[in-house]
Image (cartoon, rainbow, N blue to C red):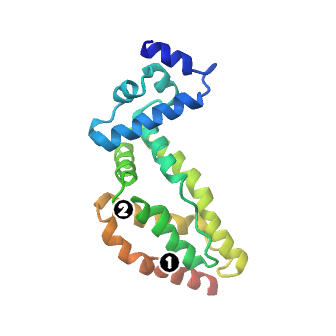
Amino acid sequence: MTATDIDEARRSIGARRNPASQEAILDAAEAIMREEGIAGFSIEAVARRARAGKPTIYRWWPNRTVLMLDVYRRFKNATQFPDTGTLRGDLVAFLENQLLGFWKDRLCGTVYRAVIAEAQTNADAAEALYAYQAERKKVAVQIVDRAKARGEIGADVDGDLIIDMIVSFAWHQLLLGRVGEAMKSIEGVVDGILIGCAGLRSS
């Protein structure tokens, strides 16, 4: 059986993703990243590894950045957003588990840094990254919403801005390759943001 035959056997009707084919492609993409790094990652290499046709891959993932993001999303799905009972605890845990700690010494950090880099020069990559970030922020902002419900911060505090500040700090450290060092600053960063929130509430 040829790669084309296997691809046809996996393929679902229309543009819907066949779960078996999708997992085979994502497994292949992750394996290539682990073995050859981002430099060796391409749609052609994934197609060979997954024994899938390139047209199928391009139908579901129009460029390699979108495919990398889906591999990264699989890593992320294994972690849960924190609920420690306090805003400070949740933001510290957010940085430790969802951002800096999640990226430290792991393939997912390398993958995400590559996605951010490609988004600087590729409009499609930038759009895919923006959409992914918007999706993640909707969930992360719940951390701030819970704090408002508990009365820890005022209802007028901008939850989107708080999450943006946390994520911006983490991104900066990731792009500088200083994730490990930044882990030591997590509590100070969170406390600085909370001091600003307290000032906003009392004004």
What is the count of numbered marks? 2
Q: At 64% from the left edge and 80% from the top edge, which residue is drawn?
A: 153
| Badge 2 element | loop
Q: Position of residue 124 (x, y in %)?
A: 44, 36
In this view, the residue farthest toward the right is 149
Locate residue 184 relative to residue 167 in the image: left or right: left
Locate residue 164 relative to residue 87 in the image: left or right: left
What residue is disc 1 on? 193
Q: At 49% from the left edge and 13% from the top edge, which residue is drawn?
A: 5
The residue lying toward the viewer, choosing from 169 and 121, is: 169
Evaluate if marks 1 and 2 touch, with contact meaning CB atoms under 8 Å apart: no
Q: Position of residue 27 (x, y in %)?
A: 45, 37
Label 2 sits on what residue type?
Lys
**Which quadrant is home to the N terminus?**
top left
Question: Can residue 124 be seen by looking at this rendering?
Answer: no
Callout 1: 10 Å neighbours few (<14), some, many (20+)? Answer: some
What residue is disc 2 on? 104
Give the mark nearest the N terminus, 1 or 2.
Answer: 2
Q: At 35% from the left edge and 43% from the top edge, which residue is drawn?
A: 118
In this view, the residue farthest toward the bottom is 202
